[in-house]
Every structure is written in C-alpha cells, then in structure tokens.
Amino acid sequence: MIQPEQQRRAYLEALGIDVWVPRDEPEPEVAAETADAAAAEPSAPPVRDGLDWAALRDAVSGCTQCVLHETRTQTVFGVGNENADWMIIGEAPGAEEDRRGEPFVGRAGKLLDEMLRAVGQGRDKVFIANILKCRPPNNRDPKPGESAQCRGYLERQIELVQPSVILAVGRIAAQLLLDTDTPVGRLRGKPHQLGSTPLVVTYHPAYLLRSPSQKRKSWQDLCLARRVAAEASP
Ligand code: URA
C-alpha cells in the first residue's frame, strides 16, 4: 500500500512542484471578483423532484430556462460514476467543455484529473458536474438568475449520486453551494455540510495553474475530503 508521504510526493511531483520548498508560506488573498447581480430570471426555478437519470438528462439537454441556451453549443450535464463516493462540483463549462459536452476537459480539467488520481479517485470513479450546465459567454461568472434556474438540476444529481463527500472546486461553486461570500481561502481546510452531505472546498484547478504554489494546499484539501468520505461511508 502506498504510504501517505509517498503519495504526497508523487502528487507534488506530478504537478511539477519542488517537494522541498517550505510549505508554510502565507496564503495570498484570493481576489474577490464582484458577482454580477443583474439579470435575475423572472420565472421560478423549475422543480426536478423525482426525475431519474434519463429524465434529468433530457430535461437538461432541452433546457431553455435562461438566456445561456441561446449561446451554448450543447449542454454539459456531468459525467462519471452515478454511484460515486466523491462528487466534484465546478462552476460552469468553458469553451472546450461546451464543444465536447463534458465537464473539465480543458487544461484545468487535466490538472483536476491528476489531482483526483493522486488520491485514488480517477475520473471514472467520481461524478463531475457544474453549477451551470451551459457555458456563459466569454466564461463570465454565472448570474444569480442563471445559477438559481440551474440549481434544481444539480440538487437532483446530488440526490441521485448520494455521494459521501462533495468537493467544491473554486470560489463560485463553493460560495453558491454554501450560500456565502466568504473567500475560498477561508472556506477550505474544514468540512462543511450541504444538507446531509459533507462538503470540502478547494481551489479551482484553473487558479492552481496560475498559482502553482497553492497546489500544496489543494493536496491537503483532497486528503481532508478522503478522510471525510471514509468517515461518511466506513
Ligand atoms: N471550469 C469549471 O468550473 N468547470 C468546467 O467544466 C470547466 C472548467
């Protein structure tokens, strides 16, 4: 069995990090981007209660609840093991995801895959979804009405998967799921609850590509998620 220290080193090496760099550097303030409060959708979010996977997929692929359906190439439902222990939730599809119909397939997605593999959770083992099922133009932040309209899809996905742990990646996913404006740097490092499901916050892989020194903290977050998942499903 791989020892935790060996695994940690393998992880850091895979991510191109010098293992001997001191780890206790102060955490940078993550710039809080201002959410666009405009464009709340007028209609109430539709209820997704009771839909099975096939009906939910159909509902998502035909969705016209917000303006994003006008600019998408296709919806990005989510992918992976429908009975996964780990559910990964990101923000929204980017250009590559919109083209391919699968979440986290660009550069950031490759890094996410490596991170997950390092804790024994390959892409085939987990379920990966986003807050939004459609790409916002120019990858802008989701508008409140858009995330509200899409929320029922995600909630039903969580109900169907019944994960032992949710890993929220990045500020948008973490803040929307936990209904807070606390920065990621203060949300990470401790378990939260989303209803009855434990939730761990970590940095978005796109941020880690820009700030590799934070990868070490993401490793700690994944180890925390692994502990939380083990406790939830002994
Ligand atoms: N970023 C996300 O948050 N989700 C994706 O699917 C791709 C990039």
Image: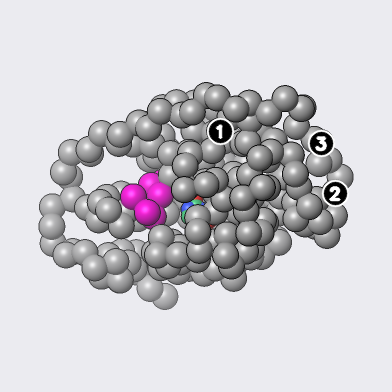
Q: Is residue 208 magenta?
A: no
Q: Can residue 158 be seen in the rendering of this structure?
A: no
Q: Closer to the camera, 147 or 158?
A: 147
Other-residue count near label 2 (Cα within 10 Å), few / some / many at <14 / 14–19 / ≥20: some
Q: Which residue is mark 2?
A: 51
The location of residue 165, given as percent across then percent down, is 57, 49
State the SS at label 2.
Answer: loop
State the SS at label 1.
Answer: loop
Amino acid type, mark 2: Leu
Report the span colored magenta. 202-207
Q: Closer to the camera, 28 or 232?
A: 28
Q: Is residue 203 magenta?
A: yes
Q: CA distance from mark 1 to mark 3?
A: 19 Å
Q: Which residue is mark 3?
A: 47
Mark nearest the camera among 1 and 2 is 1
Quadrant in which residue 40 is drawn: top right
Quadrant in which residue 185 is drawn: top left
The location of residue 182, given as percent across then percent down, is 41, 27
Q: Residue at x 61, y 50 (%)?
A: 71
Q: Residue at x 63, y 30 (%)?
A: 145
Which comes before the other along the chain, label 1 or label 2? 2
State the SS at label 3.
Answer: loop
Amino acid type, mark 1: Lys
